[in-house]
Image (cartoon, rainbow, N blue to C red):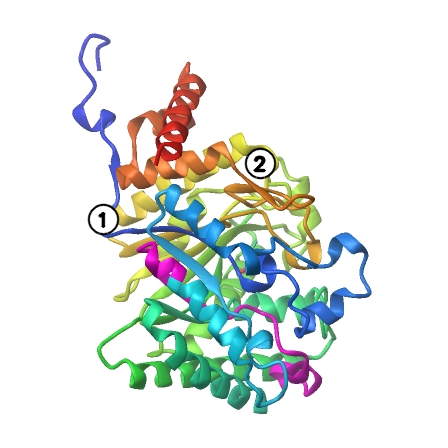
Amino acid sequence: MSQHQPLPKHEHATLKFPEGFLWGAATSAHQVEGNNTHSDWWQWEQDKPFDLRSGRACDQYNRFEQDFDLIKQLNHNAHRLSIEWSRIEPKEGEFNQTEIDHYKKVLKALKDRKITVMLTLWHWTLPVWVADKGGWENGATVSYFERFVRKIVPEISDYVDLWITLNEPGVYIYETYIERAWPHSKKSTWGQVKTFLNLTSAHKKVYKYLHSKFPAGKPVGIANNILSFESNHKHSFKEQLSVVLNDLFANHLFYFFTRGAHDFLGINYYFHIRFKDKYLTPNKKDLAQQTHDVSDLGWEIYPEGIFEVLTDLADDIPIYITECGIASTNDDRRNRFLISYLQEVARAIKAGVNVRGFFYWSLLDNFEWHLGFEPRFGLVEMDYSTMERHIRPSALVYTDIIQHNGIPHSLLRFIGHTVNAEEVLEKRQKEIRKEIESG
Ligand code: FCB
């Protein structure tokens, strides 16, 4: 193209998302609420150093109205959150009505703000009494979970639009039996298999129940951690085999065992794993040592990966990105992360993948499990000493995208490293901050 020709029109256009796209952020109860004293995680944390204990977390239990005002201010139209089983059923068979009423208030507060609610029924924590009986290794936990679901769902269903039965069953198994970094960790292949099968069975039962309760709809799915795998050497048989086997186990097995029991695919995307010649399993140190750009947690920044997993998993049913985010104390990296990952999502949609929503992880900095409070994933920064919340500039980039229902050209330029792009971005962030402050 000669210098004098104007750019084709699409070069200036917003990269649009489909009508009705859900834009939001995700959290989980134990990570934000604080004082989940009846959960197995709480119990386990008590032997850890102070900064590895959830404690008051973000105190969202008491500050949910404030957080939901932020969501509204930032223009999100959807929110993903979870409820805490151990609060609702702290003792076997005894349901705490005060806690049930609390969750009703929480969910109603979202609805009052016209937010679409995606609710996770189990995000990794168990009531102590369930854990004491063997947790998910115990077949009876499937019925305990189902009893809990049958109790809570009729109470809150008016406020819920989409159900997630389980969060990342695969990661739960990996951290408990392979990394062994979590409560009840142990080496047990049989324990691993039992846990897997019980989780698949819990999902299927709850799926069936939710469908019998709402024959007319309210989609049900899981949030599954989907990884993008790659071999470092195209012609290494070992590495290629690792890719195939890991893809099968990590990405497909749960779906295979629960086929027919998903109304949508909920995808949590964080990882791009490169296999090195000598290893058949991913080795974190190797990954961090590579020259690739990584987050504060050493997780590779690889936007193309989200395009790859979306196109790989594309199915007849809709897809929601139920989590995707970066741990970084450098918010500029979060700006780039949001724009570049969402650009890849837009590309997948253009390629025909039916993506219906995106939930950034996370709304605010929070308790990152065994890693404590150090990783900073939030669109909103937490000052844990005062419990003050501060909107980060990247949250405004996200708002800009939401307001356009797409990525405006001014933002795309930013990742293209155009001269002055930073200035343009800052100017826009200032405008949005003014806009949201003036309501
Ligand atoms: C996901 C979890 C979520 C959070 C993010 C960083 O695997 O579902 O709770 O810890 O990772």
Q: Which mark is residue 287?
A: none
- In the rendered structure, find residue 18 and report the number of the disc placed on it: 1
Q: Name the secondary structure under disc 2.
A: loop
Task: Check disc 2 and give the amino acid type.
Answer: Asp
Residue 36 within the magenta-colored segment of the rendering: no
In the rendering, at what x and y percent does residue 76 appear?
36, 47
Q: Position of residue 209 (x, y in %)?
A: 36, 85
Q: Residue at x 31, y 48 (%)?
A: 348
Q: Nearer the viewer, residue 388 or 286?
A: 388
Q: Is mark 1 within 8 Å of ligand 1?
A: no
Residue at 42% x, 76% y is 256
258 displayed left or right of 375: left
Image quarter hosting the C terminus: top left
SS at circle 1: loop
User: Relative to 203, is 345 above or below?
Assistant: above
Q: Position of residue 83 (x, y in %)?
A: 51, 69
Q: Nearer the viewer, residue 437 or 26?
A: 437
Q: Is residue 156 visible?
A: yes
> From the image, which quarter does the N terminus lie in?
top left
Image: 234 above or below 424: below
Q: Which residue is mark 2?
A: 293
Mark 1 neighbour class, 10 Å CA radius: few under 14, some 14 to 19, many 20 or more: some
Q: In this view of the protein, which residue sits in the foreground, 327 or 49?
A: 49
